[in-house]
């Protein structure tokens, strides 16, 4: 039986470890096309070591060898690196702010394009679809739900979410200002909750990598929550540039609770619409 060794026991040499991480990320980029080189190092390091230990390896270099020679290993590592944690109506007050401050602005457009970047398994996109429906806007809205993770997107396309989570989602929905009975939006299907397919009609699910792929449309609203938190500061700047290039005039950008544009090169491009909920409006 293989003996599990903790990362601290294996290697105390930070500089060598950093070199190994850099080489691994370079190898992943050149061999598999995924670019994690600008991600924030602390969380990246934790996740790489998690994979080293899960594969019964001894070092990051060992992981590099396996990633280069065994395609399945890259897939497993990708799952570790794409942190898919999400939920419906996550941070309910954010959805209240959407209803009260953002939707009235969107209402002035005959057709509304929303980009849900880093949508994970789709709960966020469906939450927006429900809120838009209740405000009478869904029929003229298209939500582009994108993520780097193909497996997560498959689940997003299905419109089926774990039934066991519905109690929590119902509470979130009510706190988010929902006006209907939440259970009217889904029916139980085994251990899944299958959401009303008409909600998904306005949702386009597609793979898009915020690091390597470019702008593909002009959006009235970009929602990218709890994604940039995993990026280093330079990468955050590049993604904010991408969002700026992908917006209509006076477009709206919504970030996660712990994310900010403060002290960014792009800070002056936006004015806060709701500082607490990290919702910004492009100045021009
Ligand atoms: C923590 S989840 C956030 C999900 C959702 N936005 C929310 O707040 O509940 C982060 C998502 O970002 C995605 N992601 C990470 N790097 C990405 C990249 N370079 N391009 C697109 N999506 C990325 C991950 O795959 C994951 O699904």
Image (tube, rainbow, N blue to C red):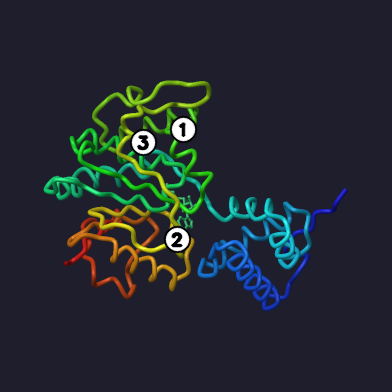
The foreground one among 64 and 127 is: 64
Name the residue that disc number 2 marks. 229
The foreground one among 183 and 215 is: 215
Between the residue at mark 3 and the residue at mark 2, the CA separation in whole angstroms equals 23 Å
Quarter of the C terminus within the rendering: bottom left
Residue 161 in picture, x, y percent from top left: 46, 32
SS at circle 2: helix
The residue located at (24%, 42%) in the rendering is 141
Between the residue at mark 2 and the residue at mark 1, the CA separation in whole angstroms equals 25 Å
Which class describes the residues within 10 Å of circle 1: few (<14), some (14-19), or many (20+)? Answer: many
Which class describes the residues within 10 Å of circle 2: few (<14), some (14-19), or many (20+)? Answer: some
Residue 257 in picture, x, y percent from top left: 37, 55
The residue located at (53%, 53%) in the rendering is 82
Does the numbered disc 2 mark a residue whose Cβ is under 8 Å from ligand 1? yes
SS at circle 1: strand
Name the residue that disc number 3 marks. 172
Give the residue at the far right of this rendering. Answer: 1
User: In this image, 36 relative to 104: left or right?
Assistant: right
SS at circle 3: helix
Q: Quadrant of residue 218?
A: bottom left
User: In this image, 246 relative to 166: left or right?
Assistant: left
Q: Which mark is residue 161?
A: 1
Nearer to us of marks 2 and 1 is 1
Whichever of callouts 3 and 2 sits on the residue coming sooner in the sequence is 3
Whichever of callouts 1 and 3 sits on the residue coming sooner in the sequence is 1
């Amino acid at each position: 039986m293989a003996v599990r060794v903790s990362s601290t026991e294996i290697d105390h040499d930070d500089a060598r470890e950093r070199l190994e991480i850099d080489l691994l990320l370079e190898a992943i980029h050149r061999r598999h096309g995924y670019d994690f080189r600008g991600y924030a190092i602390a969380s990246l390091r934790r996740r790489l070591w998690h994979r080293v230990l899960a594969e019964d390896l001894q070092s990051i270099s060992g992981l590099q060898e396996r990633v280069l020679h065994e395609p399945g290993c890259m897939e497993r590592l990708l799952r570790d690196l794409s942190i898919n944690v999400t939920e419906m109506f996550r941070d309910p007050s954010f959805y209240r702010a959407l209803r009260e401050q953002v939707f009235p602005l969107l209402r002035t457009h005959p057709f509304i394009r929303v980009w849900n970047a880093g949508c994970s398994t789709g709960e966020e996109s469906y939450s927006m679809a429900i809120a838009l429906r209740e405000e009478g806007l869904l029929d003229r809205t298209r939500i582009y739900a994108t993520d780097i993770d193909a497996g997560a997107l498959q689940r997003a396309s299905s419109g089926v979410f774990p039934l066991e989570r519905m109690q929590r989602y119902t509470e979130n929905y009510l706190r988010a200002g929902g006006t209907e009975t939440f259970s009217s939006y889904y029916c139980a299907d085994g251990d899944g909750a299958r959401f009303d397919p008409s909600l998904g009609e306005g949702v386009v699910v597609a793979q898009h990598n915020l690091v390597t792929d470019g702008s593909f449309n002009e959006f009235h609203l970009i929602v990218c929550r709890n994604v940039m938190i995993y990026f280093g500061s330079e990468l955050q700047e590049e993604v904010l540039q991408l969002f700026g290039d992908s917006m209509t005039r006076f477009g709206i950008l919504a970030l996660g609770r712990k994310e900010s544009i403060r002290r960014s090169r792009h800070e002056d491009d936006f004015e806060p619409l709701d500082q607490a909920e990290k919702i910004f409006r492009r100045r021009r």
